[in-house]
Amino acid sequence: MQPVMSVAEVEAFLAREFPQIHLDGPVYRVESLEPGVAVMRFTASERHLRPGGTVSGPAMMALADLAAYVVILGHIGPVALAVTTNLNINFLRKPAPGDLIATCRLMKLGKRLAVIDCAIAGEGEAELAAHATATYSVPPERG
């Protein structure tokens, strides 16, 4: 399945429809969008760290959810009303402060539901910091 939006189009859509994701500055960036896959970068700031100097669980959950949304948007087009119906995350190890990379793959993209697999790792690290799965409800086409 080929993407129907470019990285620039997805980022412009997010900036227009969800400006709140950039309240702390541009901490999220779409790195790539390929058939069935989106890669997103999250640059954690001090605000996203928890005691012990690691990126917080809620920050990684937000990354997984946003990256899942990005892979869906990239493949169905600019649909603001696609919504998360389920998000499950397993925290596997403490990521060091710094950039996290989320790689999300479409497992299923149906007319009403999308299921996504998301792997999160520190930049340049082979071991995952977290693994998430998400299900999104895709609104019916309006014509």
Image (cartoon, rainbow, N blue to C red):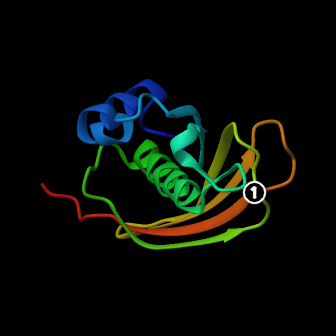
Residue 66, given in percent of the width and then of the height, sits at 46, 51
19, 69: nearer the viewer: 19
* 94 up-or-down from 100: above or below: below
Q: Amino acid at mark 1?
A: Ala
Measuring from the top left, give residue 46's x and y in whole percent.
57, 39
Q: Which residue is rendered at x = 37% and y = 41% of the image? A: 21
Extreme residue toward the front, this view: 51
Q: Secondary structure at mark 1?
A: loop
Q: Residue at x 62, y 66 (%)?
A: 132
Q: Position of residue 141 (x, y in %)?
A: 22, 59
Q: Nearer the viewer, residue 31 or 21?
A: 21
| Image spot of residue 8 (x, y percent) | 43, 24
Residue in the image at 40% along x and 31% along y: 11
Specify the farthest residue to the right: 126
Q: Which of 68/129 is in front?
A: 129
- The mark total stands at 1
Task: Determine crowd level at label 1: few under 14, some 14-19, many 20+ residues with C-alpha closer than 10 A.
Answer: many
Q: Is residue 17 left or right of residue 117?
A: left
Q: Is residue 38 above or below residue 138?
A: above
In the picture of the structure, the residue carrying the numbered disc 1 is 129
Q: Residue furthest top?
A: 8
